[in-house]
Amino acid sequence: MQEKLKEALAAYKGQRGATIPVLQKVQEELGYLPEDVIPEVANILGISKNEVYGVATFYAQFRFERPGEHTVKCCQGTACYVQGAPRIIDAVEDELKLTGGKITTDDYKFSLERVACFGACALAPVMVVDNTVYGKLTPAKAREILGKI
């Protein structure tokens, strides 16, 4: 863990109830939760590695893989689903060459996230890339957008 991050986390020494804020701080700084961070967080908080891991795996906000430079979020909500979200997701996975359950490209340029709903149902199907919303997508349009990034 980076020295600067260790210093920031020292303020939480022995605070058993601070697991979530500490994990958030680590992920904010590093972009994800590397495997070697779990024992360090446990040591700082004075809890077991299993407790830290249990919290980190319970909440969907935490990730254990280094994310890509760009985040592609595809909606899987009902409105998007009936308007073709599965085809959009397939096109994105194909365009980014994400196979076998991978969510981040080999070059760490893109990461794919499936989202339950963006609340932009009138634009279905929807994809958000780095906080820019793209609606009324087709597989070809999704590929075109990704190709320009």
Image (cartoon, grey):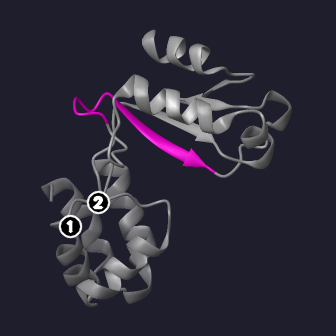
Is 119 placed above or below 1 here? Answer: above
Percent from the top left, x then y, of residue 135? 72, 24
Residue depicted at 19% across the width and 64% down the height = 6
Q: Which of 41 and 9 lies nearest the eye of the viewer?
A: 41
Label 1 to label 2: alpha-carbon separation: 6 Å
Looking at the rendering, the stretch of residues picked out in magenta corresponds to: 105-115
Identify the mark at residue 112; answer none if there is no mark: none
Q: Which residue is mark 2?
A: 33
Res. 85 visible in picture: yes
Is 35 placed above or below 28 here? Answer: below
Is label 1 in a helix, a strand or a loop? Answer: helix
Q: Amino acid at mark 2?
A: Leu
Quarter location, residue 93: top left
What is the number of callouts on the image? Answer: 2
Q: Which residue is mark 1?
A: 37
Percent from the top left, x then y, of residue 99? 33, 40
Is 35 placed above or below 90 here? Answer: below
Asked if residue 96 lies in the magenta stretch, the reply is no
Q: The C terminus lies in which quarter of the figure?
A: top left
Q: Which of 115 and 16 lies nearest the eye of the viewer?
A: 115
Quarter location, residue 54: bottom left
Residue depicted at 44% across the width and 69% down the height = 21
Q: Is residue 79 left or right of residue 91?
A: right
Q: Is residue 77 left or right of residue 147?
A: right
Discs 1, 2 touching: Cβ within 8 Å: yes
Percent from the top left, x then y, of residue 80? 74, 39
